[in-house]
């Protein structure tokens, strides 16, 4: 089959790779003169499958209202371009911003994320791509008890899905990463 992939970010390029491997005739088109020149160009480079979480989470509707008036916000909604399709999508998103649906959605994301991790490992081995990578995991720090409390729902999903993780005390954090001492002063 002839396939046209629009966009040469990480998603377009990897989709094209797997489609071509499956025997399809693939062409990738991008408005930029080179591949991965937009969002995929300068992100943090962090691959954290266990950290994947749905945007639709308890508390997000309130935060989104604040983001609307912030200049630098993680989510931008252009009110002028709101169409019926986007409104339906937003309604569904808000309807999923509750503990029960968050749990279901995060559990599903965990399964996809773990599968993606194994695909990435296989791809790396196959094409022998070289880059600096570290696999110590990430240390997620919480400043308030309410943040710790809201992380409990994520920890429950990690436990249920068998995702490797540790819950640390402040002393454990210091032992892992002495520079966190500045948070206790
Ligand atoms: C600041 C920042 C930090 C991030 N850090 C991380 C991280 O640490 N770990 C992580 O996993 N994710 C991170 N992300 C998210 C991650 O970078 C994106 O999810 C990912 O790059 C998206 O890839 P993409 O291929 O979907 O989109 P893009 O990389 O944006 O690719 C889309 C491509 O489509 C092209 N295009 C769009 N419209 C057209 C058109 N009409 N005609 C032709 N071409 C078009 C664009 O030129 C672009 O090349 C970060 C994102 C940001 C912004």
Image: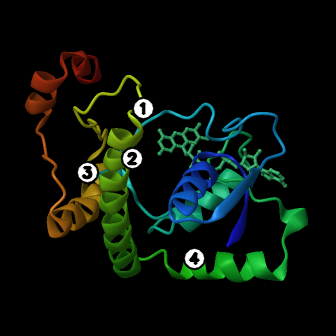
Q: On residue 123, which mark appears?
A: 2
- Gap between marks 4 and 2 measured at Cα: 36 Å
Within 10 Å of disc 4 (Cα), the crowding (few <14, some 14-19, many 20+) is: some
Residue topped by disc 4: 94
Judge from the rendering whether residue 88 lies leftward or rightward of residue 147; answer left or right: right
CB atoms of marks 3 and 2 within 8 Å: no
Residue topped by disc 3: 148
* Circle 4 or circle 3, nearest the eye: 4
Residue topped by disc 1: 129
User: Quadrant of residue 127 in the image?
Assistant: top left
Within 10 Å of disc 1 (Cα), the crowding (few <14, some 14-19, many 20+) is: few
Q: Earlier in the sequence, mark 3 or mark 2?
A: 2
In the foreground, 20 or 29: 20
Q: Earlier in the sequence, mark 2 or mark 1?
A: 2
Residue at 36%, 54% in the rendered image: 119
Q: Earlier in the sequence, mark 4 or mark 1?
A: 4
For label 2, the SS is helix
Q: Earlier in the sequence, mark 4 or mark 3?
A: 4
Above/below status of 6 relative to 136: below
- Gap between marks 2 and 1 measured at Cα: 8 Å
Q: Earlier in the sequence, mark 4 or mark 2?
A: 4
Judge from the rendering whether residue 112 lies leftward or rightward of residue 63; answer left or right: left
């Amino acid at each position: 089959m002839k396939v046209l992939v629009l966009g040469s970010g990480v998603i377009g390029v990897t989709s094209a790779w797997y489609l071509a491997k499956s025997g399809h005739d693939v062409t990738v088109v991008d408005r930029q003169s080179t591949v991965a020149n937009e969002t995929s160009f300068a992100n943090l480079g962090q691959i954290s499958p266990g950290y994947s979480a749905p945007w639709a989470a308890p508390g997000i509707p309130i935060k989104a209202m604040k983001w609307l008036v912030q200049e630098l916000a993680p989510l931008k909604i252009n009110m002028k371009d709101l169409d019926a399709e986007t409104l339906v999508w937003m309604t569904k998103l808000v309807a999923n911003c509750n503990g029960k649906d968050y749990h279901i959605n995060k559990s599903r994301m965990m399964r996809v994320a773990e599968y993606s991790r194994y695909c990435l490992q296989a791809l790396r081995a196959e094409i022998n791509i070289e880059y600096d990578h570290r696999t110590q995991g990430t240390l997620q720090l919480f400043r308030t008890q309410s943040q710790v409390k809201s992380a409990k729902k994520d920890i429950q999903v990690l436990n249920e899905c068998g995702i490797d993780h540790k819950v640390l005390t402040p002393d454990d954090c210091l032992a892992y990463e002495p520079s966190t001492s500045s948070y206790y002063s």
